[in-house]
Image: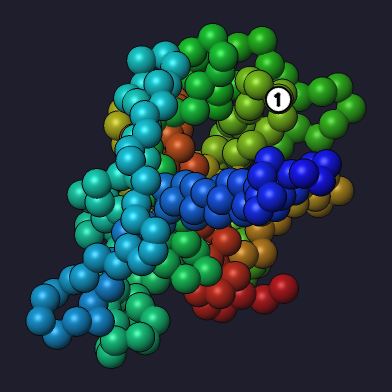
Amino acid sequence: MPTGYLTTEIDIAQVVLYVFWIFFFGLILHLLRENKREGYPLDSDRSHRAPRVKVVGFPDMPPPKRWSMPHGEADLIAPRVSLVEPDIQGVINADRPLTGYPLQPMGRAMGLPLGPGSYALRRDIPDLTIHGDPKIGPMRVLGGYQIMAGDPTPIGMPVVAADGRTAGIVEDVWVDRAEPRILYFEVALDPAVAELAGHDTRPGAPPAARAANVLLPAGFAKVQARHHRIKVVSVIADDFAYVPVTAKIDAITRREEDAIMGYFGGGYFYSSGRTI
C-alpha cells in the first residue's frame, strides 16, 4: 500500500480537503445568518394579497440572542420580533405616492427621521458613564466644569443663524463627562423666534416653560470670538423654534441626541432662505 493512503482508494489529503470545504460552507452559512440580526425581516408591500410581506431570504433568521445591559437598562434582544417600533408611526409623517418611490414628507420635513435629516430611534434613555451617571449635562448642574482660561466664553454670546438674524442667546453649555468637551450650547430663544412655537421666554418663567430652551450641537456652530457671536449656517433663525426639545431640563436621551443632530443636519437640505 503506498504511503499516505488509508486504503487503496482514500487519500488523506483528499479527506482534509473535503473537511475544509464542509467547514467553510458552514462558516459562510453561519455568517450569513448572523448578518440578519439587524435589518431583517424586511418589510415589503410588494404583494397585493396582503398589506405587508416579511422577506427573510436564505438562510433563515438566526435564533434570538440576548445581551445583558448595565445599570438596570433593559436587555437587548436581536433579532427583534418586529423592526417597526410601536411609536415610529407617530414620528414619521410621510407618504409614498407609488410603490418603489421614496417617502414624501407631509407638512414640515425638518425634524422627521427621513431623508437627509434621518436619525435612528434609539432607546429614549440617557447615555451613562461607567459609574451609571448621565454622561451629558449642563455645567450648571454637573459642577466642577469651567471654560478653559484663555478660551472665549460662549455663555452670553448671540447665536446668528444662516439668514443673519439672531436666534437667541447662549445660556449654558452642555459637556461630556467621559471626554471633557462641549457638546451642546443651550440657547434661550429670542422672543420673536420663540413666539412661533409658543415658547415662554419671560423672566422668571417656570422650569417647565424654560425647558423650551433648545440645544445647538457644537458641531454645527462656529464660535467667532472676534465678533462675539456663534454662527450657524445649516438653519435660519425661525427654524430654531422647532428644534426638538429634551424632556428634562438637565438631561438628554440617546434618541433626543439623534433627533437634534438630524434636525440641524437636515437643515442643509430642507431649510429655506439660507445664505452662506
Q: Which residue is mark 1?
A: 179
Residue 120, compared with residue 185, is above or below; it is below
Q: Quadrant of residue 54?
A: bottom left
User: Which residue ends up furthest to the left in the rendered image?
Assistant: 49
User: x, y percentage for residue 238?
Assistant: 47, 64
- Please indicate, yes or no, whether residue 169 appears anywhere in the rendered image: no
User: Which residue ends up furthest to the front in the rendered image?
Assistant: 1
User: x, y percentage for residue 220?
Assistant: 66, 53
* SS label for mark 1: loop
Q: Residue at x 56, y 18 (%)?
A: 129
Q: Residue at x 43, y 34 (%)?
A: 253
Q: Amino acid at mark 1?
A: Glu
Quadrant placement of the N terminus:
top right
Residue 90, compared with residue 6, is above or below; it is below
User: x, y percentage for residue 259?
Assistant: 45, 50
Q: Quadrant of residue 48?
A: bottom left
Residue 65, compared with residue 113, is above or below; it is above
User: x, y percentage for residue 108?
Assistant: 35, 71
Depth order, front residue of 18/77? 18
Q: Is residue 223 left or right of residue 193?
A: right
Q: Quadrant of residue 245?
A: top left
- Please indicate, yes or no, whether residue 128 appears anywhere in the rendered image: yes
